[in-house]
Image (cartoon, grey):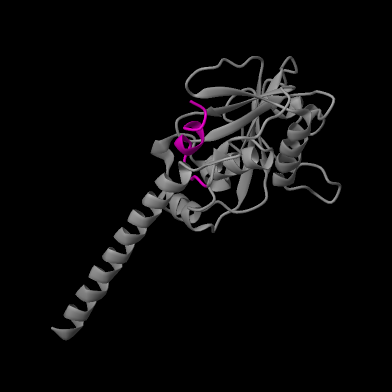
């Protein structure tokens, strides 16, 4: 009976540790997401950007081109299925590569994909989607920022892409969801502590915009843009 008793104790302690971790993680995510950074910063209203959520994941949406950055020189129209160049914005997001490419629907989620994403064992990707127009609503908020802060945002996004020896973006061939999107290799690994929403929140922080102190979920960003 002793081995069985020891096994039960180990199992029980493991469950307690797991439940305790989930509790502390959830409490931290809730509390830290409510702390606003960059709340009092004033700036010129010069460049229009957006933040958009699909209910889980947050994208940063920027103009395709202005005097600061022409994204179409690196994120190519011809790398989308439609090859449509009559576009005005590009939505950019960072996330777990395995989740992005292998889980187009929640029903496609595999335990191995979820485990790798949660523990930082997989690589990451950038998802880009061209848009002709953007409509503001509860899931899409407009932010008008200064040119100087937009330069900071551009630098942050640029540094998230993985580049080859020629400093070109590394396109992931043929893996878009629809007609106007494409995937590229990214830097870093996804984990419970660095999620797609953490990345978007850090993008806002880097460009001196309102953001959460830390958040792993989209609500932690959007609660600061009510």
Q: Is residue 87 above or below residue 128?
A: above
Q: Is residue 186 visible?
A: yes
- Provide residue 210's location: percent of width, then percent of height: 59, 35
- On the picture, is 205 further left or further right than 194? right
- The answer to whether residue 94 of the structure is visible from this angle is no
Q: Which residue is located at x 65 percent, y 23 percent? A: 180
The residue lying toward the viewer, choosing from 96 and 55, is 55
Main secondary structure of the magenta stretch: loop
Q: Is residue 47 magenta?
A: no
Rendering coords of residue 114 (x, y %): 44, 50
Residue nearest the viewer, comparing 27 with 37: 37
Q: Please report the bounds of the magenta region as a residue range.
A: 214-226
Residue 38, picture quadrant? top right
Estimate the x, y position of residue 164 in percent, counting from the top left. Answer: 80, 49
Residue 224 shown in magenta: yes
Tell me how many marks there are. 0
Q: Is residue 185 left or right of residue 201?
A: right
Where on the picture, by quarter, is residue 40? top right
Task: Indicate the position of residue 49 as horizontal and vertical percent values.
Answer: 66, 25
- At 27% across and 70% down in the image, what residue appears? 13
Most extreme residue toward the bottom is 2
């Amino acid at each position: 009976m002793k081995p069985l008793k020891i096994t039960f104790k180990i199992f029980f302690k493991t469950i307690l540790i797991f439940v305790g971790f989930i509790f502390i993680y959830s409490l931290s995510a809730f509390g830290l997401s409510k702390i606003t950074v960059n709340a009092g910063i004033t700036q010129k209203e010069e460049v229009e950007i957006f933040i958009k959520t699909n209910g889980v994941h947050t994208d940063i949406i920027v103009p395709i081109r202005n005097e600061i950055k022409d994204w179409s020189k690196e994120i190519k129209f011809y790398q989308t299925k439609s090859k449509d160049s009559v576009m005005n914005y590009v939505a950019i997001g960072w996330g777990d590569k395995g989740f992005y490419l292998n889980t187009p629907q929640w029903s496609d989620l595999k335990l191995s994909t979820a485990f790798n994403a949660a523990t930082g064992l997989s690589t990451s990707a950038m998802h880009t989607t061209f848009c002709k127009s953007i409509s503001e609503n509860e899931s899409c908020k407009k932010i008008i920022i200064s040119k100087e802060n937009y330069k900071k945002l551009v630098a942050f996004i640029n540094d998230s892409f993985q580049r080859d020896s020629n400093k070109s973006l590394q396109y992931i061939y043929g893996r878009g969801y629809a007609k106007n999107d494409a995937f590229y290799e990214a830097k870093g690994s996804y984990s419970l502590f660095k999620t797609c929403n953490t990345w978007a929140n850090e993008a806002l922080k880097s460009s001196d915009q309102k953001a959460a102190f830390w958040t792993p979920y989209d609500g932690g960003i959007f609660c600061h843009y009510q």
